[in-house]
Image: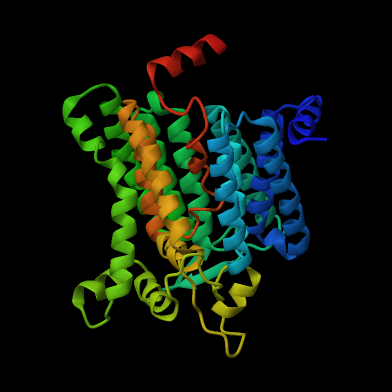
Amino acid sequence: MGFNDLKNKIVNYPVDGNQIFFVSFLVLYVGSFIKFTTFSDYISPNLISRCLYLIVGLLIIKIYFFDELNLKIFLLDSLALLIAFAVWRRTHAFDIVICTALILGARNIDFRFLMEYFFKVGTIILVFVILSSQLGIIKDLMYVRHGFTRHALGINYPTDFGAHVLYLVLAYCYLHFKQLNWKSYFSLFIIGVLLMLVTQARLDVAAIFLTIPVMFIAQRAYEHRDGFIKLASFYWTFPILLAYISLTAAYFYTPSNKLFYSLNKLFSDRLRLSHMATSKYDFRILGNFVLENGFGGSKGFKLFTGKPIGRQYFYMDSSFIRLFIIYGIIVSLAVIAVMTIIALKSIISHDYCLAGIMFLVSISGLIEPHLLDVAFNPFLMALLATNVYYTIANDKILEESK
């Protein structure tokens, strides 16, 4: 039996590629989300990992047997997956395989529908986790900093909770881009204030506040207002610019320099830790295996309270630093290229919404480690999806489908 015969036999089963993708995405999203909660104390991580392996296999079936692939696309998809698997085997970071499979698997998927799916499921899970932590079903890890108690509300760390809220805010802004008004922006401000009061996740709160002017400018640019178009047209540069700034600052950091000292203090010691990473590990084509000790989760909480002897805190919070140190040069350049392409397409199509979101995702990537985590960031899947940008043609199709 040849490849085409096998493909026809699989395709003729009473399921389609869309169904396979959304089932796969749901399992990967929920599974990855649970790993970032204290539910993971009661669930075998090996069991979760095996489930994720199986679902990635299902996505690969969708890519090769249900998508229309010409020779060029077949070779490019195969090369991307091959590199992802090679990086995984070298670094033990399976999230690069999940991310790659989802980006390729999202080909011809309705992105706006996917974002509704992401937003609704994510909100339900987050509320469920919060309630579970407050009812005592799982732990609400509490970290004391400068006399203030920071609640993680069932998530592994307060800043991880903040990152979840930030990405759900971005999903909401994407879905309701044309309807955003002063009430929407005021609601975002209130969310930021509440998040600050509960978690003290300062940088995530700052990113949420920054969402207000960024999306306001994008809206005005979408409405063809010249001054705002000029401002929004620079959004595409930020993935490249912030990646460059992250690497340069980390590499040349010296604590005796007043500017570096102030920036390191502002970013909660992230700059010093990034410098440690660039000093300890080489920039390699396929990345490095890196052993990190963070404060997140029950094990990390013990480190925070000083109980484990001989373990030292070391964690790279910046996604851009993680990309180059852990995932390697090829993956780093590819991810930055994907972000830039999505933003450029947004500007070329006079959408500006996703360009603004890529700007904000880049800001998050500067301070948070979740750029490749499906539990947080769904926006890289916009690369090959359909109905991505707010254009006249897409809006007409959407109206006709209602």
Q: Give percent across and percent down for residue 233.
A: 25, 36
Quarter the C terminus occupies: top right
Up-down: is 238 above or below 150? above
Q: Give percent across and percent down for residue 126.
A: 61, 47
Q: Give percent across and percent down for residue 362.
A: 37, 51
* Nearest the eye: 16 or 164: 16
Q: Give percent across and percent down for residue 55.
A: 72, 46
The residue furthest left is 227
User: What is the quadrant of residue 217 in the picture?
Assistant: top left
* Nearest the eye: 221 or 280: 280
Q: Left or right: where does residue 28 sit relative to residue 75?
A: right
Residue at screen point 37% across, 58% down:
366
Q: Kindly tell me whether residue 189 is visible in this rendering.
A: no
Q: Kindly tell me whether residue 235 is visible in this rendering.
A: yes
The residue furthest top is 400
User: What is the quadrant of residue 246 in the picture?
Assistant: bottom left
Residue at screen point 34% across, 50% down:
239
Quarter the N terminus occupies: top right
Up-down: is 60 above or below 274? above
Q: Left or right: where does residue 256 sit relative to residue 45?
A: left
Q: Left or right: where does residue 160 sit relative to residue 64?
A: left
